[in-house]
Image (spheres, rainbow, N blue to C red):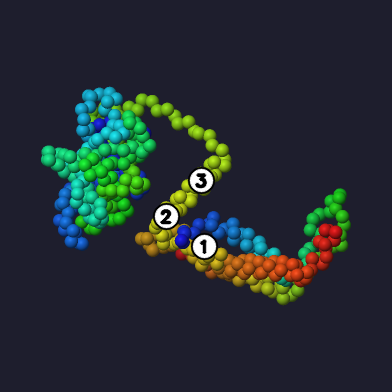
Amino acid sequence: MTEIRYFDTVTIKHKDSRQFLHSHVEKYPLRYDDGRISSQGQQVTCYPHNDTNNQWQVLPTKEIPETGRGRVVRHSDVIQLKHIVTQTLLMTHDVASPLMATNQEFTTVDPALEERRNDTLFQLQLNDANDGTAWKSLSGHFKLQHLPTKVLLWTHPKALPEWAFGQQEVNGNKNQQDKTTYWYVDDILEDGTGNDFKNRTVHIEPKVTKKRSFVKKFVELQILMLQHNAGLTADHPYASDPIEWPFSLSGVSFWTNNEKQQQIYMIGNLLGFWICSIGVSIFVGIMGADMLARRRGLDPIEDSTSLFSQVIK
Amino acid sequence: MSRQKFLHHYLPAHLASALVAGSVLNFIVVETVNYPISALGPKTRMRPALRARMSKPAWAVTLGLIAVVIGMFLWLSPLTYGFP
């Protein structure tokens, strides 16, 4: 965790999909397959691998001092992000994104174009922060809100067509409550002043571990599991219904190898599972019948040669 | 909604059901259980000894079941253990 200062070059990752905010010289095609039209601006995407095109420089929009604490980027600061390789500024505008007509397109623009400057302003909204909280790498989860249009920088796991090399789409999300709009700075690569930046966070208080009772922890874990479970949307290719489990109708895919087309697929011992299931059903049946009979004063199962009845007496 | 199946979803339940299946089989093929079931201690009251006897068909059924289960295991093991 290092505090981020203005003019730092950073890589930014999306918290949920763990992909880097990325841009490259290729432009959006003028016309998409569904007939909608783009701005033909430079593409902004998300990319899972390390690449120089993931590097962005944090620029100030206010006067900052030459040195010292005044250069630290803080909560609710308005910043610009400059793409290092193409030397252009991140922006968004009222043009529909390639895949979602409801969301705004992200692109970049030449810093010299003064009339587009307004579109390059973003407000940094740190999660769980007050005014003055410093922006830190890794732990500082943030939303990036576009100042003029109020949309949030967002990405979702949907691949763009070939013209963007199948990379993940980035667009502007209007839904301020969306929980998947968080990003974090993965790494600081360079300092604007060429100073040693690795050690500049002088003193970090070690976090004190809070004590909680076992019951509280247990309840919290249960709630977290329920919430996570309720938030599941995608189906797993090897998903199965619980009713299939006692009969081992579906297996577990332990290991696959796409290149050689190999797979280890665990099927339970089918006969073993079925015998056990039959055994349990017989047990339930016998017990049920016996209970019913006892209610009516019958005793179909003798108490094991009256051995145990002796003990009871 | 369907879920991905994990070992911890069914293995404990399967083990318990295997135990139940064993005692159900015992209940069906054997009239009684071996008795006494514990060693003689200083305060144990003595009881007449009992021996569980299995008839020939009972042996056949039990051994048959064990054989098919082992056979099934051998038949499926290349898939599960990834023998080439």
State whether discs 1 and 2 lie on one chain: yes
Looking at the image, which is closer to me, A127 or A204? A127
State whether discs 3 and 2 lie on one chain: yes
Q: Quadrant of residue A193?
A: top left
The location of residue B64, given as percent across then percent down, is 65, 73
Q: Chain of mark 1?
A: A
- Residue under numbered circle 3: A221
Q: Chain of mark 2?
A: A
Looking at the image, which is closer to me, A293 or A56? A293
The location of residue A305, given as percent across then percent down, is 82, 67
Q: Earlier in the sequence, mark 1 or mark 2?
A: 2
Amino acid on which the number 1 mark rests in the picture? Pro
**In this rendering, is residue A100 above or below A93?**
below
Picture residue at 22% right of the left edge, 50% below the top: A105
Quadrant assignment for the C terminus of chain A = bottom right
Picture residue at 60% right of the left edge, 67% below the top: A277
Q: Let me know if residue B62 appears in the view.
A: yes
Amino acid on which the number 3 mark rests in the picture? Leu
Q: In the image, A167: left or right of A230?
A: left
**In this rendering, is residue A220 above or below A253?**
above
Picture residue at 56% right of the left edge, 38% below the top: A213
Labelled disc at residue A232: 2
Label 1 to label 2, Cα distance in Å? Answer: 17 Å
